[in-house]
Amino acid sequence: MEDEVFIQIVYIINQLVSWLAALAIIFGGVVPYIPQYRDIQRTQNAEGFSTYVCFVLLFANILRILFRFGHYFETALLWQSIIMIATMLIMLSLCTSVRVTTEISTKGRSFTDFDWNYFWVWSRFVDYLQCVITFTLVAALLTYLLLDSVLFVETLGFLSVFTEAMLGTPQLYCNYQNKSTEGMSIKMVLMWTSGDTFKTAYFLLTKAPIQFWICGFLQEKSKTTVDELPWRFLHGCVHLTNPDNPT
């Protein structure tokens, strides 16, 4: 009798931990963007945040959802992608409205101009939606036609997670161009790193497709580099303001 009670308690605890881990994986990915959203909203300045982060996450998660049609993975990871897509659209909406408000030039740029010089720097949020919908329809059609090809499905999965693994690259480039990390939420970056560690562990424990945990390792590496940037720029500033003092 006691053994049965113990087994039931262990089962309940395991289920509770599994549910909490699933909730963390679904909603944990969007938490880092809350402080960044609030900073942009408060300062009305989106220059420190690269909207190409939204680009990477939107297209990576769209590809991940399509990948699931050919290679099943946990429902929690599917919901994570859906929530992340919604979050990135919200971030884009805010950044676009802030940029339009502060932009000196009154000339509008739209998706239908098909001008690569202004790709992903359009003037209206609806243009970003048009781009995302167009990509989704084209990718969905290709997936439908080639769903029986194992090579296509696995390549699709690799592209989705490899694209997501490069998430830190747009922010690195943005900081490099600005020669500063001003406007980039340090809280966001730190949450990125801790979240990636949790995600990688989750992928390994739940035996997710190999593409997922490879993505986790790559993301941790790129996010660590972004983590180091504020300290590097700060160190550079100290040298500039104290040229005679090597420390």
Image (spheres, rainbow, N blue to C red):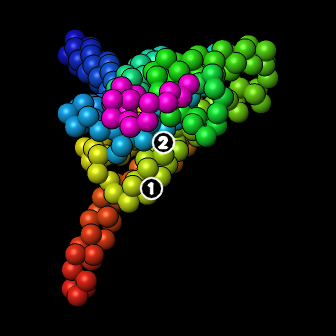
The residue depicted at 44 percent of the width and 30 percent of the height is 106
Q: Indicate the quadrant where residue 7 lies.
A: top left
- Residue 18 vertical placement versus 159 (above, below): above
Q: Bounds of the magenta span?
A: 95-110
Element carrying mark 2:
loop
Which residue is disc 1 drawn over? 177
Q: Position of residue 40 (x, y in %)?
A: 27, 35
Pick the residue in front: 119 or 30: 119
Q: Indicate the quadrant where residue 92 lies.
A: top left
Pick the residue in front: 181 or 203: 181
* Residue 99: in magenta span: yes
- Residue 126 vertical placement versus 118 (above, below): above
Which residue is disc 2 drawn over? 167
> Position of 62 compared to 200: left or right?
right
> Position of 192 compared to 139: left or right?
left
Element carrying mark 1:
helix
Of the residues shown, which amino acid type is indicated by label 2? Answer: Leu
Q: Position of residue 135 (x, y in %)?
A: 63, 22
Pick the residue in front: 172 or 116: 116
Of the residues shown, which amino acid type is indicated by label 1? Answer: Gln
The residue depicted at 56 percent of the width and 25 percent of the height is 110
Task: Report how far apart the C-alphas of labels 1 and 2 lie in the structure.
Answer: 17 Å
Please report whichever mark, 1 or 2, sits nearer to the chain's N-terminal start: 2
> Position of 83 compared to 164: left or right?
left
Q: Position of residue 131 (x, y in %)?
A: 58, 22
Residue at the bottom extreme of this rendering:
244
The residue depicted at 57 percent of the width and 36 percent of the height is 118
User: Label 1: few (<14), some or many (≥20) within 10 Å?
Assistant: few
**Quadrant, the C terminus:** bottom left
